[in-house]
Image (cartoon, coloured by chain):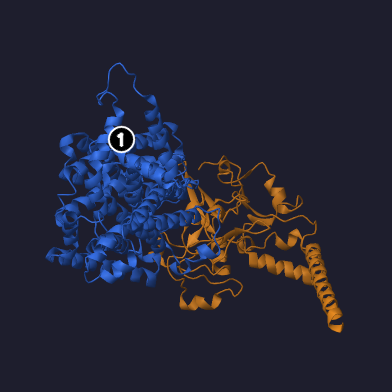
């Protein structure tokens, strides 16, 4: 057990779970009442059919599909960001991985639910398994999302095991639950080695899965002949958009957690600054892709494609469209480009703008295209009804409520990773930096620098990717060395 | 000894039964082929609509609605674009007053040879029959509306509510066509129930199905007072639809998409969409 817990850190983090203040209950009551309204709206829809929505012909899809793409996008906050930061060994990831991974799991659940809400016959949803046609992009989505959800649950659970063991040892009321879930973890070197290897395998596996998920979500649109959807850029555009909105969601969640649970001592300003920089990169990518899409569509000037484009640029959807471009893409880029903008407040403002813009972006992909079908004699009108807004609000509130509940029963900051960082990061990072700079070590000037160990180090650091991918089960001593290098090889700029 | 010999003979008997059944089945199939398809090749049902003959009387729309149990949405739902028309009468206004011309276009499903709706269906509820009819399995459809979105002609309809008829019209419901539930997609089937009935009639009379049997078979074609709609087998070069489809006036909607519609329009003047 030695080295497994660090009371100074653990007690402060566990304290965030043990003392739900009045604010918790007020927030829970508020969220649950919105959820109840959402359930009422859904019951109405189930009884009366989809006529209770604003949809019609040709507006066959609306808010629910936008919610689906939006939630699946948000889900890319967690697992993907956490996996990438883990793989590159960014030391500053430690306090934020857990709260990111939880977003993924809950957002995926509500993303999948949005599609079922959209179905005319939700009772027949299992037909997709019974009579599934592998040619249909919807089936690709079913496969990718279920793999992603399973993978994300495993990837959330694995790093939770040592924390569950710490909680079990604290002998609280829920100790039996934590005992069951911690699977007898004692923090022995062998257990730790297995756990770390499993985490690194999952971290690498989850990245292609996450990319595949939003790519096939885009294929739902891109594989049809509809003007404005039938585009080769949609796969990467959706993936970038997903990470973009996911990061924004993560920053908002972090700001709320930090404020309400008083975790300023572990989620520092530097974390917001670093994530703000990542978000800035995604802003630039998003601006680039958006520019790309519209420039190509407008210069192509194909009448069928131009109708929805003009509807956005100067038609009925001009206000949300330009609001999205200026307020949601360009303004956050400007805010995040300056160090003064990458404070907690700046990040939250940019993130809220981005989240609203990204929901609008999905809405503006779906609605203007469906409004103007290729046969130009029937044009649609669409205004979402209270049922659609109610269900949407219910989904968002249920998401927030589940997230709150998770933070109440499980540590929202990974305790063992934080004290592992406190104990081991600094020597490793120092060692790594030293390895970059051969002149740092005082050595006789006459002797030539030894090239061999450095080549060996690079080889070892390359092989840790292979080992991390689970291709090689190296011997213990070797993996120890590799692990030491893994910790050394932190890619963070500011740790 | 007895038991030993009994088993192989039992198996032989079983094999013989299976072979007999298979032979009977293949004979039956051959028989059906002989009475069904006179030339042995597959049929490809198609429709030709002569827009120069069409008067826009909407007889086809009403006949289709009665034949196929298409529900009455009511005015409110119609105003919300939720009315269902397996056969719809569209109008295109060309030019401006006083040089105004209105073109009526009866629009059934195009029954594409390469239908975009089929590719996207996650459960195989949308399918194309051997004779080229694009149809919908109402009891399997999950109502995801992907096919309705993918159709470049917007010819598929969704039941936004439980289908309803006024009390006095309930007696007119056609027993040959199933009534759909709420939440599923439906569409024109080229009146496949009439095609089946015609095939059975021909078989009962022990004669091949002829073009005369089918050329006014669907409800829309049967009801057209201007005789503008013809139906038949596009694979039969002698059929009326094949003959009309070869006309220089023939055009298909959005041919550039590569969907190969089997509904062919005839029109003298240049088409302006």
Q: Is residue B42 left or right of residue B109?
A: right
Of residues A143 and A409, the one nearer the viewer is A409
Q: Give x and y (percent) for residue B176.
A: 61, 73
Extreme residue toward the top, this view = A446
Q: Colour of chain A?
A: blue
In the image, residue B107 sits, relative to residue B160, either above or below, namely: above
Give percent across and percent down for residue A139.
50, 56
Decide which of A332, B93 is in the foreground and name it. A332
Report the quarter where the C terminus of chain A lies.
top left
Residue annotated with mark 1: A284
Q: Nearer the viewer, residue B168 or A484?
A: A484
Give the quadrant of the N terminus of chain A: bottom left
Which secondary structure lies at badge 1? helix
Q: Is residue B90 above or below residue A178?
A: above
| Residue A472 vertical position relative to residue A42 in the rendered view, above or below | above
Q: Is residue A304 above or below residue A21?
A: above
Q: Position of residue B232 (x, y in %)?
A: 69, 56
Q: Using the image as rendered, state which of residue A282 and residue A371 is in the foreground.
A: A282
Q: Position of residue A124 (x, y in %)?
A: 48, 68
Would residue A202 be found to the left or right of residue A77 on screen? right
Can residue A284 be seen here? The reply is yes
Residue at x 24%, y 24% (from the top left corner) = A442
Can residue A382 be seen in the rendering of this structure? no
In this view, the residue farthest toward the bottom is B2
Question: Which quarter of the picture shows residue A183?
Answer: bottom left
Q: What residue is rendered at 68% in x and 58% in y?
A: B130
Chain coloured orange here: B
């Amino acid at each position: 057990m030695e080295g497994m817990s660090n009371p100074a850190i653990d007690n402060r983090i566990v304290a965030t779970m043990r003392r739900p203040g009045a604010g918790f209950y007020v927030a829970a009551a508020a969220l649950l009442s919105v959820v109840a309204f959402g359930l009422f709206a859904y019951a109405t829809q189930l009884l009366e059919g989809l006529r209770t929505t604003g949809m019609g012909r040709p507006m066959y899809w609306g808010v629910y599909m936008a919610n689906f793409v939006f939630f699946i996008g948000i889900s890319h906050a967690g697992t993907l960001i956490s996996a990438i930061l883990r793989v590159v060994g960014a030391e500053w990831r430690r306090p934020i991985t857990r709260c990111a991974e939880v977003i993924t799991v809950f957002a995926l659940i509500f993303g999948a639910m949005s599609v079922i809400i959209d179905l005319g016959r939700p009772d027949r949803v299992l037909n997709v398994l019974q009579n599934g046609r592998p040619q249909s992009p919807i089936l690709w989505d079913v496969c990718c999302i279920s793999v992603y959800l399973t993978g994300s649950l495993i990837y959330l659970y694995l790093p939770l095991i040592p924390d569950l063991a710490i909680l079990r040892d604290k002998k609280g009321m829920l100790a039996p639950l934590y005992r069951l879930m911690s699977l007898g973890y004692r923090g022995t070197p062998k257990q730790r080695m297995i756990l770390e290897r499993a985490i690194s395998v999952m971290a690498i596996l989850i990245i292609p899965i996450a990319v595949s998920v939003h790519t096939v979500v885009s294929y739902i649109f891109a594989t049809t002949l509809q003007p404005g959807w039938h585009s080769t850029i949609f796969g990467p555009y959706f993936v970038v958009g997903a990470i973009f909105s996911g990061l924004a969601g993560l920053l908002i969640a972090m700001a709320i957690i930090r404020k309400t649970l008083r975790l300023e001592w572990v989620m520092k300003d530097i974390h917001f600054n670093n994530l703000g920089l990542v978000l800035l990169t995604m802003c630039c990518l998003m601006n680039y892709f958006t520019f790309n899409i519209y420039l190509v569509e407008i210069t192509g000037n194909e009448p069928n494609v131009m109708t929805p484009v003009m509807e956005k640029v100067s038609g009925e959807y001009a206000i949300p469209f330009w609001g999205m471009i200026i307020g949601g893409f360009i303004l956050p880029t400007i805010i995040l480009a300056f160090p003064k903008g990458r404070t907690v407040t700046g990040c939250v403002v940019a993130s809220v703008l981005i989240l609203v813009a990204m929901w609008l972006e999905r809405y503006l992909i779906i609605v203007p295209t469906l409004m103007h079908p290729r046969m130009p004699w029937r044009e649609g009108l669409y205004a979402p009804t209270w049922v659609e807004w109610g269900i949407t609000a219910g989904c968002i509130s249920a998401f927030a409520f589940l997230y709150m509940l998770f933070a109440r029963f499980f540590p929202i900051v990974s305790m063992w990773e934080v004290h592992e960082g406190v104990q081991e990061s600094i020597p490793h990072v120092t060692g790594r930096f030293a390895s970059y700079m051969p002149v740092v070590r005082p050595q006789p000037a006459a002797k030539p620098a030894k090239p061999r160990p450095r080549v060996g180090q690079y080889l070892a650091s390359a092989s840790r990717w292979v080992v991390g991918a689970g291709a090689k089960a190296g011997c213990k001593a070797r993996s120890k060395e590799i692990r030491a290098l893994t910790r050394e090889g932190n890619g963070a700029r500011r740790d | 000894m007895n038991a030993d010999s009994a088993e192989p003979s039992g198996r032989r008997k079983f094999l013989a039964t299976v072979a007999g059944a298979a032979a009977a089945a293949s004979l039956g199939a051959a028989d059906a082929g002989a009475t069904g398809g006179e030339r042995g090749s597959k049929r490809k049902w198609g429709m030709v609509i002569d827009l120069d003959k069409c008067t826009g009387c909407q007889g086809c729309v009403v006949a289709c609605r009665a034949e196929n149990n298409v529900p009455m949405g009511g005015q409110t739902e119609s105003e919300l674009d939720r009315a269902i028309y397996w056969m719809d009468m569209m109008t295109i206004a060309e030019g401006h007053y006083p040089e105004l011309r209105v073109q009526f276009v009866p629009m059934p499903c195009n029954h594409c040879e390469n239908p975009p709706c089929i590719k996207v269906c996650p459960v195989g509820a949308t399918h194309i029959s051997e004779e080229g009819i694009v149809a919908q399995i109402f009891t399997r459809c999950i109502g995801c509306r992907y096919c309705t979105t993918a159709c470049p002609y917007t010819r598929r309809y969704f039941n936004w509510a439980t289908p309803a008829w006024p009390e006095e019209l309930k007696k007119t419901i056609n027993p040959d066509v199933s009534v759909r539930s709420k939440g599923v997609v439906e569409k024109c089937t080229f009146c496949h129930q009439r095609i089946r009935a015609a095939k059975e009639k021909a078989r009962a009379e022990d004669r091949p199905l002829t073009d005369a049997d089918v050329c006014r078979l669907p409800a829309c074609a049967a009801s057209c007072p201007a005789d503008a709609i013809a139906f038949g087998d596009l694979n039969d070069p002698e059929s009326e639809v094949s003959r009309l489809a070869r006309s220089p006036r023939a055009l298909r909607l959005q041919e550039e998409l590569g969907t190969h519609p089997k509904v062919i329009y005839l029109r003298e003047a240049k088409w302006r969409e």
